[in-house]
Amino acid sequence: MTDVLALTSELIRRRSVTPFDEGCQELIATRLQRAGFVCERLRFGEVDNVWATHGSGSPVLALLGHTDVVPSGPVEDWTSDPFQPTVRDGVLYGRGAADMKGSVAAFVIALEQFVAAHPDHAGTVALLLTSDEEGDAIDGVRRMAEVFRERQQAIDWCVTGEPSSTRKLGDLLRVGRRGTLSATLTVKGVQGHVAYPDKARNPIHQALPALAELAARRWDEGYETFPPTSLQISNFNAGTGANNVIPGEAKILFNLRYNPNWNAAQLETEIGAVLDRHGLEYDLHWHRGGEPFYTPEGRLRAVAREVLGEFAGAAPEESTAGGTSDARFIAPLGAQCIEVGPVNASIHKVNENVSVADLEALPKLYRRLIERLLLP
């Protein structure tokens, strides 16, 4: 069994369902300390974080990952136990195999090999891990970014190991992500009998025109490689369960995925203005999940394009699609950020998996990125 397969398997065995790490980071930190890294462990609430560094000064190249995973769902739906790594027909199965314990293990192997071969390398190479990526993302990298600001810790380049490839390893290079903004809207009415609407105020009827306007709005035409901003209503709850009662309130959840044409404050102002214009009585609570980020053409993109092309056999697609990642907290520090990882077809699904061949190629890919960025 190769080193990366063995380490990935050991990580999968640890039931690190967000926000719990279950010793994954300690296992990794112990290995990296033996390789000469300085490892700082920072715990906030229930969330574990580790910042491991080797070398000094600039440039600073950070590898970014998470040790937490999403719940497995019903174990009986899996072909094998989700927390017992199993190889079948050249494929490793287990929760976190692709998202993203495989990448984390590959980071560790690549870093060990790099500092063994180049102990006096230029600049700083680092690994940042959290156990709060799949959850609320409050006490993980978001909090670590605050620590870095206070310390004036610079990061020049950041490579996140999120599963970005679509069909084969290296066929996609993620160069940005949309921002995410979520809202809980409570529209207030007056409960009453449906036969006497004049004595009540129906919050559903009041809310629908405003929501229809927001849902139909063309927010923008996109930005660079970003798709247009999108608002999606995900939940609408109202009523007592009876068909003869006008409800007293309606609760609506919606989310915006937005490109760099907007920031969260601007969107909040725009939406509040629409609700006010429709005369609603309402409470509105926002959760800012993170602003969009975009890495323009530069050394990091150029090196990554070259390396991925070597592994995939063709230049990668360069994309900003998908959800969010913890890179959204590192980019505002001034870092150029990309995402490079295994095929994402099975992430968050039953029987999550990664090709063993791809897994064994990942340390070579990450090491090559590190060498071409930090070596003369």
Image: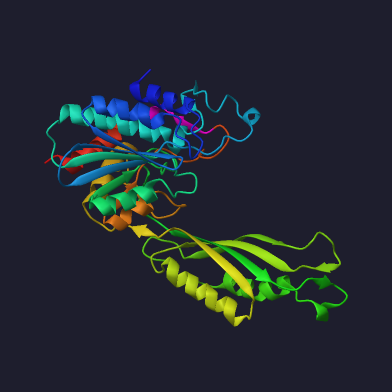
Report if residue 66 is visible in the image.
Answer: yes
- Image quarter of residue 372: top left
The answer to whether residue 193 is above or below residue 118 is below
Q: Residue at x 67, y 72 (%)?
A: 207
Q: Residue at x 48, y 25 (%)?
A: 13
- Tell me residue 140's x, y (percent): 40, 45
- Image quarter of residue 57: top left
- Tell me residue 228's x, y (percent): 46, 65
- Tell me residue 181's x, y (percent): 49, 61
Q: In the depicted view, which residue is nearer to us: 185 or 93?
A: 185
Q: Magenta stretch? A: 352-361
Q: In the depicted view, which residue is nearer to us: 263 or 147?
A: 147
- Image quarter of residue 119: top left
For the view shown, which residue lies furthest in the top direction? 1
For the view shown, which residue lies furthest in the front direction? 45
Q: Is residue 355 magenta?
A: yes
Q: Give the quadrant of the N terminus.
A: top left
Q: Is residue 30 magenta?
A: no
Q: Residue at x 57, y 25 (%)?
A: 81
Report if residue 220 is visible in the image.
Answer: no
The answer to whether residue 22 is above or below residue 179 is above
In the image, is 61 to the left or to the right of 291? left
- Tell me residue 281's x, y (percent): 64, 76
In the image, is 336 to the left or to the right of 10? left
